[in-house]
Amino acid sequence: MTEEQVLARIERARRRKARVREERITLSHGSGGRAMHTLIEAVFLDAFRNPLLEPLDDAASLRIGETGLALTTDSFVVSPLFFPGGDIGDLAVNGTVNDLAVSGARPLYLTAGFILEEGFPVADLMRIVESMRAAAERAGVQIVTGDTKVVQRGKADGCYVNTAGVGLLEHHGLGIAHARPGDAVLVSGPIGEHGITVLLARGELDIEADLESDTAPVHELVRGLLAVPGVRGLRDATRGGVATILNEVAKAAGVAVIVDEDAVPVREEVRGASELLGIDPLYVACEGRIVAIADGASAGEALAAMRAHPLGAGAAIIGRIGDDPPGLVLLNTAFGGTRIVDLLAGDPLPRIC
Amino acid sequence: MTEEQVLARIERARRRKARVREERITLSHGSGGRAMHTLIEAVFLDAFRNPLLEPLDDAASLRIGETGLALTTDSFVVSPLFFPGGDIGDLAVNGTVNDLAVSGARPLYLTAGFILEEGFPVADLMRIVESMRAAAERAGVQIVTGDTKVVQRGKADGCYVNTAGVGLLEHHGLGIAHARPGDAVLVSGPIGEHGITVLLARGELDIEADLESDTAPVHELVRGLLAVPGVRGLRDATRGGVATILNEVAKAAGVAVIVDEDAVPVREEVRGASELLGIDPLYVACEGRIVAIADGASAGEALAAMRAHPLGAGAAIIGRIGDDPPGLVLLNTAFGGTRIVDLLAGDPLPRIC
């Protein structure tokens, strides 16, 4: 966002004045959808309002001294803590690494804050910490400071982890708000694997599927992609899935996002489980997939750059940016119809990350 | 710490190999005392080990590009959320501001991560956020990025807040490991007010006292103090109180810390409540008090610098650094005896911050 865009947004928000209608927090306030957006706008943004927070990007872009930095944070409350393909420790490192990477920063240093429940097995904590160590090593970051709190039994769910991360800003001016009609929309691989894996790992559903979380650090994939001129903005798709990111693009840039359902890569296992669960894979969380907006003329090159990295082997161009209707995401369905893909209302998938 | 000291410490720790004997996490692993130190050394330090983490200072000192930075994090789980003199929101901002300040950094940018329990009143959240806004304004920092998670009812205690902070490192080479025999030990004001206030606010004890939390940002107090040459190291006294900091000084520098009980400023209300509770005010948490180590010749000037700031009006020189016995804190008691003030064993005061 340019400074004028940010200031205009502040002014619009002041006039609009979002309001949380509920008197109490519900799970939907944490699901990445409409209720969460309203909570953020009405409570956090309204109080903390400043031009660095305002873009609500995955990371804030700062300048300290002569150095451009990105700063981000995420808390992880996934249940269960361990699942096929990863655990809360991988998520906590990869999630923050990815928020830095898609902001155009080289991830460097992480903090780690643990909230532990009395009675939590020390062996499980050591397993989580070992995952964090391995994930940090893989992503080339160091965990340099931390904090541990313990709460009484029944005041947490074993272990919650917060990470914050700092990176060196290497690519300036990236932002989904720069999306323009004619741009292409890309996704770096099949969607929804993390969310479905975690849901199935809860063991409450009588579904078996050979699936693993897609949790992974995307910084190298992003580095390759950002070597392509014409890449305008990136986001990593977590809570709320790809559909939420696309809505954020549409609203931030004031454009239409038009997606071809047939073009969206979804593994058969994810599609099958989603159908049984009655959810749309577009809303299911990933933890190692990015959405990219690229100038139409660069789309092929951007796709090739993604596919050149193992984590982008399943990348695809899933749609394009249009000008009408501004602020909305349209899906051309496999059956030939068109429907609006709105922000998620409600909370089908709590505690997925 | 110098680089050699850090490397020596890594080597010693590798040989020593701390071990958590308990199979499950207990409240004492979060109390700031011996169990927490062992957990940190055996689990976190052992896995994440790197020269930036190793000093276990309040904040890590980094260099990114040409810029020296401090980075820190803290989670806040205080119960109750609101108490005389403050709430979890003030603590979350001041705590991180203070960790940056005592590391010699100018606090600049904060992150905010919320873990909310389903059913938490939105009005309480807004009150907490408003406290954070006011505290950030008072401390001259901006909250630039955040995260919100919601967990099911019974999986948290209303609201937990994590903050991480970045500051510009302005004073290099500070560190409690630099304490030398002949140095003076100072505290910036009466101790234990935060911890006793929170305990009493729980309403479980039949004690009334006219007390308020000491939660406050100490960055300006620290700025004045660091204008005095001869100030070697600072810490803010939170969990585990002043006694824990003094033990960290003794161990990090390999020196004896000798404290005069009579010289330690403690308000009558804190002393009275502590006696009734059977706890030593030296172990009770503060949230706006710092411990400073200054060259003996500079002690008077350091004290004057503290007292020149309203938050340091009750500052005092409470003891000195000796050479024997190394690694221990000795208290010359009001009754003329001497006793060892050890790291806290057990968990008399959980969830105080």
Image: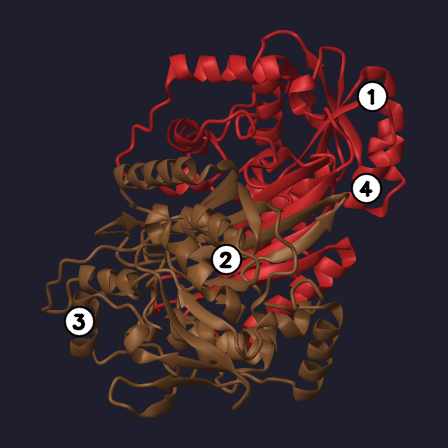
Chain colours: A brown, B red
CA distance for labels 2 and 1: 39 Å
Residue denoted by label 4: B221
| Number of the label disc, if any, that sits on residue B188 | none
The chain letter under disc 2 is B
What residue type is disc 3 on?
Ala
Do tag 4 and tag 2 residues touch (Cβ < 8 Å)?
Answer: no
Depicted B59 relative to depicted A208: above or below: above
- Numbered circles on residues, count: 4
CA distance for labels 3 and 2: 41 Å
CA distance for labels 4 and 3: 59 Å
| Residue A18 showing in the rendered view | yes
- Identity of the residue drawn at 69% across and 48% down: A68
Horizontally, residue B151 falls left or right of residue B11, namely left
**Local secondary structure at mark 4:** helix
What residue type is disc 4 on?
Leu
Marks 3, 2 in one chain: no
Label 3 or label 1, whichever lies nearer to me, is: 3
